[in-house]
Image (cartoon, grey):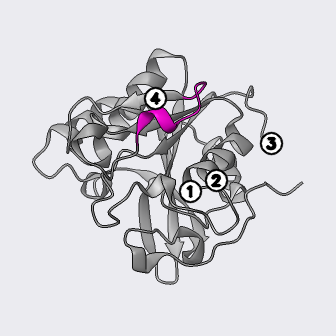
Amino acid sequence: MIDAAAEPRLLGVLLAGGLSSRMGTPKGLLPHPNGGTYLDHSLQRLRSVCGEQIAVSIAADETDAASALPSDILPAEITRLRDARPNLGPAMGVHVSLQHAASNGYLGCLFTPVDLPDLLADDLASLIKTWREQPTKILLARQSDPERLQPLVGIYPVSDLNRVQSVVESTHRSLYRFLQSTDYRTVDLPASRLRNVNTPADRAPSFDRNQPSE
């Protein structure tokens, strides 16, 4: 595990506030091919690199949709970061998380969605290592072959809190559009490890490699 006490302090945040409308059931509760659930594996992956300095971003009110992740399924020790307003997309989860991080002495947040069953702890370790070289800049995973930016897999410094708030308050609420006019750095990752699961048809066997290499 990466030394969670090393500076700068980083909060690992699992984004699980989506309503999973296309899946029809909370994606975090889907059974992972290697046992447990997507939620179990996602939390294990974050713990591998952030220790217990982790939180889960959840919907404003999961009772509004049967397919939203219920907050009572989370382990008691996990910090729950509830969206301040409903149906504003992942930018709201990023904003609330950065607010919490800024108020608790963290320099940034490492974000990963709950619906990436093949992402590795080693991938997150690579992101953290690169980010620490320039911790005041946003660092994002970039899918290779075909090339595609991943706005929800990466590290946002708390210094970008106000700019992310502007995204939440905009009409488009798009982090991708925000990033087009923002200076950021990237780490290339294979497309296979950034495969996300949005519908039942997207589900496929994954591999249990969530422990970082020695």
Q: Residue at x 32, y 47 (%)?
A: 90
* Residue neighbourhood size for the residue with mark 3, other residues' Cα within 10 Å, grouped as few (<14), some (14–19), many (≥20): some
The residues colored magenta run 70-78
**Amino acid type of disc 1?**
Tyr
Q: Which residue is mark 4?
A: 80
**Disc number for residue 1:** 3
Instruction: Count numbered badges in the picture.
Output: 4
**Pointer 2 local density, CA inside 10 Å: few below 14, some 14–19, many at least 20:** many
Q: State the image coordinates of residue 107 (x, y, percent, origin top left).
A: 54, 27
The amino acid beneath tag 2 is His
Structural distance between the alpha carbons of marks 3 and 2: 15 Å
Residue flagged by tag 3: what amino acid is it?
Met
Is 202 situated left or right of 169 in this image?
Answer: right
Where is mark 2, residue-wise? 41
First reached walking from the N terminus: tag 4 or tag 1: 1
Mark positioned earlier in the residue sequence (3 or 4): 3
Q: Is residue 151 magenta?
A: no
Q: Are marks 2 and 1 in contact (CB under 8 Å)?
A: yes
Quadrant housing residue 54: top right
